[in-house]
Image (cartoon, rainbow, N blue to C red):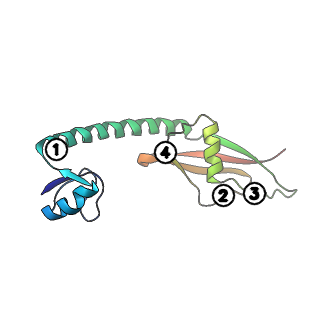
């Protein structure tokens, strides 16, 4: 039986794939779970419309994220940290602190972003940090740690 997958199904395929699957497996397992629907002519044309909508939405999202990344690229974010007399830093600046600082500077909350930082920053001065967005878009920011006054 030819079916349209409504979600990723292990050993069969990805969401929106059209696959040929045995009738018994479809009737007894996949349809009751709500993972597939029959691949009728109407459903296939609806699938093509849905794929077009998803592609348009994906393109729009990539465009928005690239604009945000371009604006963010090279931006400097400063943190005041406690230090001792020798300049050793007490504490550190983490991914979460950087994200919080970005959001406080009018960074959109809906942007799916992660900070590429192996270890928290524990040294004074500038550190280049990669900000990764969804869809493979990224930017570099400068995180500046200064002694608290």
- Quarter assignment of residue 55: top left
Q: Regarding mark 4 in the picture, which secondary structure is present there?
A: loop
Q: Which dot marks residue 91?
A: 3
Residue at 53%, 35% in the rendered image: 71
Crowding at dot 2, Cα within 10 Å, few <14 / some 14-19 / many 20+, comes out as: few
Q: Secondary structure at mark 3?
A: loop
Considering depth in this image, is 68 or 101 the residue closer to the camera? Answer: 101
Q: Residue furthest right?
A: 85
Query: What residue does disc 2 label?
Result: 120
Mark 2, secondary structure of its residue:
loop
Which quarter shows the N terminus? bottom left
Sequence-wise first label, 2 or 3: 3
Question: On the picture, is 71 further left or further right than 36?
Answer: right
The residue under label 4 is 112
Mark 1 and mark 2 lie on one chain; the one further toward the N terminus is: 1
Residues at marks 1 and 3, CA–CA distance in whole angstroms:
57 Å
What separation in Å lies between label 1 and label 2 (alpha carbons)?
Answer: 50 Å
Q: Nearer the viewer, residue 102 or 85?
A: 102
Tell me what residue is drawn at x 55 percent, y 41 percent: 73
What residue would you read off at disc 1? 44
> Neighbour class for label 3 at 10 Å: few (<14), some, many (≥20)?
few
Mark toward the start of the polypeptide (1 vs 4)? 1
């Amino acid at each position: 039986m030819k079916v349209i997958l409504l979600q990723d199904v292990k050993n069969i395929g990805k969401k929106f794939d059209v696959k040929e699957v045995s009738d018994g497996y479809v009737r007894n397992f996949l349809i009751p779970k709500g993972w597939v629907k029959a691949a009728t002519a109407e459903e296939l044309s609806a699938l093509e419309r849905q794929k077009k909508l998803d592609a348009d939405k994906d393109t729009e999202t990539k465009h928005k994220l690239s604009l945000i990344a371009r604006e963010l690229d090279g931006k400097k974010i400063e943190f005041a940290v406690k230090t001792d007399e020798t300049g050793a830093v007490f504490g550190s600046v983490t991914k979460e602190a950087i994200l919080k600082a970005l959001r406080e500077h009018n960074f959109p909350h809906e942007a799916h972003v992660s900070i590429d930082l192996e270890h928290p920053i524990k040294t004074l001065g500038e550190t280049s940090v990669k900000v990764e967005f969804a869809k493979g878009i990224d930017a570099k920011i400068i995180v500046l740690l200064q002694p608290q006054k």
